[in-house]
Image (cartoon, rainbow, N blue to C red):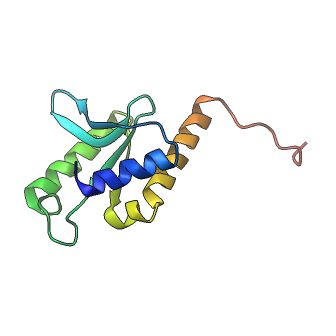
Amino acid sequence: MSSLENDFLTLCRLMKLPEPLREHRFMLSRRYRFDAAWPDKKIAVELEGGIWTRGAHVRGKHFESDARKYNFATLAGWKVFRFTAGMIRSGEAVRTVMEAMELNHGALSGPPAKSKAGS
């Protein structure tokens, strides 16, 4: 596990998020995997390391392959969030996932309650 993955999982635990599946294979025919995923909510996280050092996934073939993977995931109904090291270490990544889970939960529980002000 990379230090970036470790940081993200540690923050998830501290914030009491359900434990994500690591290296979740969401499309068997394409061998695509997410760095972290909550399949029951169709929420996925991709940890984007190497953006300042010109890592493989920000160049040519790998960048294109990742774009294709994200498009397939979106077509399959996944919410895919991409986070850099700075976003993870600042807490932004975990806050975003928490918000996505709350929104996802709200969408499953039906329409919002009527406002008293509008009555």
Task: Out of 44 and 36, give the one closest to the viewer.
Answer: 36
From the viewer's perspective, is residue 48 above or below residue 37? below
How many dots with numbers? 0
Is residue 79 among the parts visible in the rendering? Answer: yes
From the viewer's perspective, is residue 31 above or below residue 116? above
Task: Out of 40 and 27, give the one closest to the viewer.
Answer: 40
Is residue 81 among the parts visible in the rendering? Answer: no
The residue that appears at 46% across and 60% down in the rendered structure is 91
Residue 64: x and y in percent read 15, 54
| Image side of residue 95 versus residue 28, left or right | right
From the viewer's perspective, is residue 87 above or below residue 104? below
From the viewer's perspective, is residue 24 above or below residue 96? above
Location of the C terminus (image quadrant): top right
**The image quarter in which residue 29 lies:** top left
Residue 28: x and y in percent read 19, 27
| Image side of residue 107 versus residue 84, left or right | right
The residue that appears at 20% across and 46% down in the rendered structure is 68
